[in-house]
Every structure is written in C-alpha cells, then in structure tokens.
C-alpha cells in the first residue's frame, strides 16, 4: 500500500481546474490541493476555430499546472479537455501543441465520454441503481442514463449555462422574447433524446452535478437554513428550482448578486442552466433531483482509483464512504470494529424493544466506525469534534437526515443527553427516540470496550418488564469495562429502554 | 524516535486521576485518554489514620487504573500520592498494600516535592523566569518560588479548598464569624512562609494552577465573554478575584450553582480557595495571576519527557509549544519552514515600512509553521480550520492576544480581508494594522512557495513612494509562484503597504 498523488486536470470551455488527490489506490483518498483559473478557451471561437489568444491563455495555464505537478511531485497526471477543444476544427493542432510544448497528454473527450466520466463521478458518490445523470457545464450539458449502476448511454448537448447565456440573453434582465427563444432551444435539443421522456423515470432517480446545479442547491440551502456544511446528498425539488428561476428572472444583476447562496461569478449565467434543469425535471416527471459534488474530474480519478475492478464504480458507496473517512482520519481500527461488533450484538438482541430495522443498524454501524474521529483534533471534546467533522465533510450516499443522525450518535457516544434540535427540520420528532436508543447502545458498546483491547467477547441481553440485564462474556474479568459502563453508560440505557439496567460478568473476579 | 504511551496516576485527597499521554520523548506529545474518579481518600481520616473504607475505595480505583494501563498497553506508569497518604500514619502500610495487591509502585510525594512537580508543570507551560507558583488542591496548597526558570523552594500548607471548607464552613452561606476564622487561618499559615512577603515580587510573576484557580478563571472568562476556548495564558486580576469572592460569599448554594463558568461540583468548596489566592495576591502586591493548565501530573510527565536534559524544563516554551502543535498535527515540515524563511525575509526588509519588532516577528514565524494545520481536517477551508485548531487548543506561553493574532494570520494566509472583530477586546485597534501587514507577508510567502518545493531561494524587496518591487531569486524560473502570487497575494500587499506591488524574477523563463 503506497501513497500516491494523482493530479486531474480538466480544461473546460470557461474554466481550467487542477485537483491533486492523495491516496492509496483502492483503499482511501482525500483532496490535497486545488487550483482554478478562468481561461475562457471558447472566447472568440468563430467558425469553429479556437482563437490564437485563447489557445495562448490555455497553454499558459496548462504550463503552470504542469509545473505545479512537477514541483509538487505528483505520481500521475490525468488531463482532459471537453467541448471547446472537441468542437474546434483546430482542436487536434492545439492538443499537439500541448504535447510538444508541455509534454502533457491531453485527452479530448467525445461527448458520450464526457457524459460517461461525469456519471462515474456520480455513481461513486450516490447509491442510485437506475436513473439519469445531468451535468450542466459552461459549454455543454451531458445527460446519461444509468442501468444497474452502470453508464448505459449518454449524450452531450449544446446546453451549457455560459453558451446559452451568450447566445440568448443580451441585457441585464432576460426579456420575455429571449426567454421564449431559450425555452424553445432547450426543448428542441431535449426532444432529440429519445430515452429522456416522461414516464421513463418510474422508480429510478435523477442526479445532478456541475456548478450550476450545485449553486441552485446552495440557494435553496440558504433559503431553508440548511444545518449541514456539505451538499452531499442534498435534494433539490422542482418547486425550489421554480422559486430560484422566479428570483433570477425578475431581479436585475445587481440585486441577483445579493441573493443568499448565489455565487456572484455565476449570477449572470445561472438562469439558462436552471431552465434546462427545470425542463428535464418536467419532462421526466421528476419531483426531486439529488445533488452530487463529484463530476468529470472525479470520474477520471475513479477510473484510476478503482482500476483493479472490472468496472470502476464502488458497489456500496455508503460503506466505502464511511471507511474512507475513517481511514483518512487514521481511526484506531481494532477498537472501532470491536465497538461496532458489540453495538451490533446489542442492537440485534434489543430489537424486540426498539423495533428498528437494518436501515437504522447501518447508521449505528457507521457511527461506531466513526465515533472517535474527532481525536484527530484533540482528546478533550473529541465527541464534539467527531460531530463537526461529519457535518462538515458529509458522508457520500447517505441522506442529509442519515448524516445528521450518524453525526449525533458520535456526539453522544461518551456523554451528554441526546437532543436533535440543532438539526431543525432535517430530523423528525420520532428521530429523537431513534437517536436516544442508538446513542445508548453505542455508548454502552464504547464503555464495554474501554480498555481498547477487545476484552469483552460478547454481551448477552435479557429483560423483563422492570429490568434489563447485560451479561458480559470475557476471557479476563472485565473490571474496567463493568466499572466504566456503570458510571457512564447505564443511565442513558435506562432512560432509552425504560428499565433498570444491571450489568454483570460470567467471569469471576481474580485478585489483580 | 519511537512512540510511547505514558500513564500518570495522581491519587489526591479527594480525586484520583489517570492521564495517558502519547508521544516521542523530547520530541512531541499529546493527551490520549483520561479518567477521573472521586475517591475521597481523606474521608473519615481521624487521628491521622486512613479509614479502611477509604483505602478500599482507593485500592479499587487504582486496580482499575492499573488494568486500564495493562489493556491499553502503556509503556510506563508513573503513580504518585499526595497529602492524604503523606500525612497518614498508616500511609506506608497503604503504599505497601498497593504494591502487593496491584504491583503498582506509588510514590508518596513530600510537600516540597509536590510543590516541585506542580512547578515543573507550570514552567513547561508559562515563560516565567522568576516568581511564584501557587497550586491550590483539595487537601493542601503548594507555594513555590522560581528563580531563573528553576524551582528554588516550595512548601505545602494545609490550605486545600476541601480541607478548609470542611473545617471552617458549616452552613450553606459562610457566616461573618466563619469567614473571619478562615481568614485568620490563611494569614497564619502564609505568615510562616518567610519568602512570601510584600515587595519580593518586584518584576517577577505569579502563576496559579489547580482546579480552584482554573475555575475562578472560567468564571471571569464567562463574565467577560472571553473569545478563546482555552485558558492557556489567561490572566486573572485581583479585582476579578474580588468580584468572584463577593458573588460566592453572598449567594446561597442553589444560586451559586447558576453562576456562569462555575462547575457545580466545586460550588460548595471554592470560596476558601479564592480567599487563599486573594491573600497571596495582596501579600505579594500582585495585581495579576497567570493561569496554567498543567499541574502535578504534567510535572511528573515532563520529568520523563525531558529526561535527557539536565533540568526537565524546556528553555523556550513558546517555540516548543508551536513545534509540538505542528508535529502533533503532522505538518509538512519542508513547506512550513520555507514559508517561515520567506516570511522572515519579507518582514526584515519591510521593517522600515511596518516598524515592528522581534516580538511581532515571533508571531509571524509561529503562524508560518502552523498555517496549514487545518489540512488535517480538510483541504477545503483549511485556513479556517487552522484558526479553529489554534483558538481551541491554545498555544502555551503566548498571551491570549498573541494567540488570537497567530490564529488570525493562519486564517488569512490564503484569502479573505483581515478583520479582528471576532476577538473583541482581546485585540486593540492598532492590532488591525498588525494583522493586515503580517497576513499580507504570510500570504505572499505562501504563494511564493506554492509549488511546495522551495524553488524561490530568496526575495529582494525595494520600494519608492509609489511602488514596492519584489524580485525573486530562484534556480528555476518560478512561473507558478509568480502567477499565483499575482493572482492571490498582491492585492493584500498593496492595501497593507499602501503601494502598487510588482513581482518579477531574476531567472529567465525557459520554454517549458
């Protein structure tokens, strides 16, 4: 297992970006650096020819990216260009210059490959099985169909937010005629995609990515006082897209810039992209769209990261996301997996009392792996730091509600009286009981593994109307575990399960 | 350099505590675990004999601590007992039982040794050269004199907060007669310490430690809306001690428990401790007392950690504290030290313009070593995470104002317009200019080391009334550094130094 640094360069029509991702292939990864530069490669592209000045700007930026990679000492560079280079008649000449002058191999992605890599990015973040992935970029928009967690087909259409703005919107506020022309163009282009029609969605999901879509989500998050610091798993509904369109269409630019959540460098081009999204949602009869943060760059990265798989998509994004986070923050594996084991044993035996299902079990298991994460910051208050790290980074594949619950379980794994208030409407009233009962189980498992040496092999749970009895099976008399569980874990168990709780051991205390 | 886990056990008159500290001796350390248990060893100690029930409780707890160490796999256990065991006529018998039953060697600290170890803890946290260290515990209070950063002498007096409360205060609110008796006892005891007299303080410092003193500081912090999450370097003034005494003396227990910052399990015993502190401050003519978080346990730890020194006290607590924090959070050393070098070169050459001294240079140097700390949390927003980590952990030896400035410099090392508002009265109006100019220097140094490979060997600064010129000396043409500095660092330099800023390189650009 050796650490590698992979750079992914993405030369778009408007922006060039580089990310450096550090990781051990197939094991764990994290973002380590990022540079973004507005290049406007498409600018002055008349009659399908990249302008000399634009090419010079792009070469300048790519040279810097290449030098940055050299000095950073990255192990591999993956570089790709999209619609501007693809569509240019002198695109091949540009690629050859990049190769000759910089020694950098730039892959020009065909439209369906661009859709494919965006979909790879999405599939490695969102647990959809069947459905559609929409990626709205600057120059083009890609739409893909996913069948059984694989890219089935995809298309690139000239519906990028910047391209549409340049072509259809002249003034500060869009006119009725402009909006009509824009809608007609969007409808015409989408009509050409036979597999994107009403009724085809049934039961499958719609996923969105790219700056336009993320920014619509940020606007909705700002309007609704969203309590997480991440857009992982954020769901945008059609009504919210409508509301954003209304605000964007009515206000002059200066006012639009003040809209909460809207990035000022998108305020002038976001509306056409929002109209594309809205049309697609209507067309599919989709009420909701799930946001992904990943995109083309991550798709290119995952092709490398999952290179040993026959198809570079992780089977279980949730399980891997939890494991990746645990690994990135250097969790103490033997302790964490034993807490998960004991918590699972308690969950299973107590199921007649709590009535929860494998769905809740997954949240408990995840919180068990992540409970000590905050120790990376400091031992003091590490339970609070764990919550902060989870609500800050998010957990791929989990819904916002599930992420909040996992974060709360880590928060209350040592002490405190579980409350759910800070997450507002994200959690339902019933989730209070869930959090209390799961936190009680996690806390008990933590204290039964207080010596961090897996001394307690198992716990047997029996109860009657008044008393819940926990019998510990251990090789050595679990003195520390009995004592610390009694001091710190039983009160919450008693309140969570409405019984007096007794803990005992089958092993006999020895002298020492 | 091998990682060790050291457990320090401290059996006090009221409480038993264990801390596990992980670290590489002489290199870096951090707290890894902690357990605290109220044992009340002193309870029922009549005629100088530890009661059988009290010894049984202590043995029970120490057995658990020992088992915890065994299962945790600690490399060394340092265990000490203080006044209760020291003063008991059957103390030796108790120590022998601990040895026989638990295999644990318990050192019984003589009064002056208890004072010595508390002082070692303090000296490794606070940069005092000469002065006094006061440690108010449950059973006794230790007072030490420090000369030239060494423990000169110390004494243990029967002025512990719990012992005084038990002896002098009967009811809920202290009566005038009780208070008088208490004051007399305190004065009598302190009168016996010849070297603790008015006028002896001149120019030297008073440092306080122990739960009573920390809690007085917490009360003051709560009253004044203190903006740091740490008491490192907190200064308590006599007026604030007066105010706490007034509140504690006037209110019945139920009301006292509601006082902001006061721990409810100290509400009943804190007043006598506050009176001891007040008397000592008056006696020495000291207006201020600096808080330390370290104490006896840390002193015992440092004797081991600094075992290779002739005297186990670090020479420069500030420099080591910064380095320890950088090491604990796995800083990228080569990058951090090069940023510090370039920032130092800028600071020095720009000194005619900014006029700052070595004191401010130290803050800049420290922030350069710590600027990327937040990457341990995530690359995104790592500058904000750096600030959070510093204001959360504090920096030993720095004043609260200095800590806030270092945190702000890391916060603004990448982007943002420096403001100091969030630290309220901790910073003066003039500090706004300091933070802006130092942040401008740090940010420029960061972007001049953007490739993280020390490409820029030096920077030469010249200026006239209008223009500040930065000339980079480098082996290779510093393309990335020039470009990213121009995009991201020059604007703040221009506003901080009131000149147009130009950056250029002596090296000639090559083709690649």
Image (cartoon, coloured by chain):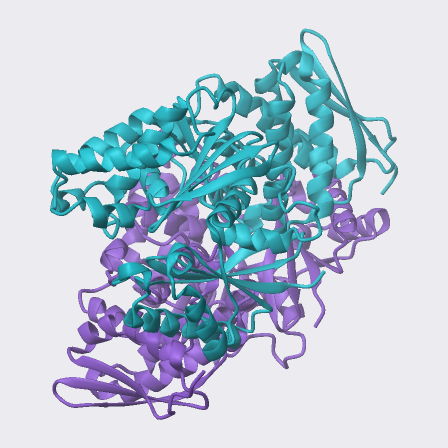
Chain colours: A cyan, B purple
Looking at the image, residue B374 sits to the left or right of residue B424; the answer is right
Q: Is residue A367 above or below residue A325?
A: above
Quarter of image, res A366: top right
- Judge whether residue A248 can be spotted in this image: yes
Q: Is residue A342 above or below residue A93?
A: above
Along the viewing direction, whichever of B419 and A96 lies nearer the viewer: A96
**Residue drawn at x 22%, y 50% as measured from the top left:** A166
* Residue A65 percent location from the top left of the image: 44, 70
Q: Which quadrant is home to the C terminus of chain B?
A: bottom left
* Residue A245 percent location from the top left of the image: 23, 33
Looking at the image, residue B342 sits to the left or right of residue B162; the answer is left
Q: Which quadrant is home to the N terminus of chain B?
A: bottom right
Along the viewing direction, whichever of A44 and A512 lies nearer the viewer: A44
**Residue drawn at x 47%, y 72% as measured from the top left:** A96
**Residue drawn at x 49%, y 75% as measured from the top left:** B335
Quarter of image, res A360: top right
* Residue A393 percent location from the top left of the image: 48, 45
Along the viewing direction, whichever of B52 and B14 lies nearer the viewer: B14
Quarter of image, res B42: top right
């Amino acid at each position: 297992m050796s650490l590698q640094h992979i750079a992914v360069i993405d030369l778009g029509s408007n922006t060039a970006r580089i990310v450096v991702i550090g990781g051990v292939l197939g094991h764990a990864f994290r973002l380590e650096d990022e540079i973004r530069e507005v290049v406007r490669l498409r600018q002055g592209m008349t009659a399908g020819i990249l302008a000399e000045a634009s090419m010079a700007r792009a070469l300048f930026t790519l040279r810097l990216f290449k030098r940055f990679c050299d000095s950073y000492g990255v192990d591999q560079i993956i570089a790709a260009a999209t619609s501007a280079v693809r569509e240019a008649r002198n695109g091949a000449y540009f690629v050859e210059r990049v190769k000759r002058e910089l020694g950098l191999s730039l892959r020009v992605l065909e439209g369906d490959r661009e859709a494919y890599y965006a979909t790879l990015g999405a599939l490695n973040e969102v647990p959809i099985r069947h459905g559609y992935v929409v990626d709205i970029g600057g120059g083009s928009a890609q739409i893909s169909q996913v069948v059984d967690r694989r890219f089935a087909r995809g298309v690139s259409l000239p519906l990028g937010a910047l391209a549409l703005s340049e072509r259809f919107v002249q003034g500060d506020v869009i006119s009725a005629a402009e909006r009509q022309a824009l809608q007609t163009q969007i409808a015409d282009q989408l009509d050409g995609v036979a597999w994107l029609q009403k009724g085809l969605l049934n039961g499958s999901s719609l996923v969105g990515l790219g700056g336009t879509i993320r920014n619509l989500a940020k606007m909705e998050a700002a309007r609704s006082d969203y309590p997480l610091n991440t857009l992982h798993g954020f769901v945008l509904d059609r009504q919210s897209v409508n509301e954003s369109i209304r605000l964007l269409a009515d206000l002059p630019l200066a006012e639009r810039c003040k809209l909460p959540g809207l990035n000022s460098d998108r305020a002038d081009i976001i509306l056409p992209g929002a109209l594309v999204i809205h049309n697609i949602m209507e067309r599919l009869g989709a009420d909701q769209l799930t946001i992904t943060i990943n995109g083309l760059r991550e798709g290119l990265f995952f092709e490398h990261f999952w290179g040993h798989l026959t198809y570079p998509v992780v089977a279980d994004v949730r399980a891997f996301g939890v494991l990746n986070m645990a690994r990135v923050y250097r969790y103490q594996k033997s302790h964490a997996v034993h807490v998960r084991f004991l918590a699972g044993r308690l969950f299973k035996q107590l199921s007649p009392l709590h009535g929860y299902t494998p769905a809740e079990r997954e949240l408990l298991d995840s919180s068990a792996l992540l409970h000590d994460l905050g120790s990376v910051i400091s031992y003091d208050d590490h339970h609070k730091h764990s919550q902060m790290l989870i609500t800050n980074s998010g957990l791929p594949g989990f819904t916002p509600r599930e992420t909040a619950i996992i974060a709360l379980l880590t928060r209350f794994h040592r002490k405190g009286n579980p409350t759910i208030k800070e997450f507002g409407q994200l959690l339902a009233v019933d989730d209070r009981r869930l959090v209390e009962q799961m936190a009680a189980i996690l806390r008990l498992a933590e204290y039964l593994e207080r010596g961090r040496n897996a001394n307690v092999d198992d716990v047997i749970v029996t109860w009657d109307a008044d008393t819940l009895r926990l019998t510990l099976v251990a090789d050595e008399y679990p003195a520390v575990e009995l004592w610390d569980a009694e001091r710190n874990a039983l009160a919450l168990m008693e309140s969570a399960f409405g019984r007096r709780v007794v803990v005992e051991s089958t092993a006999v205390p020895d002298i020492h």
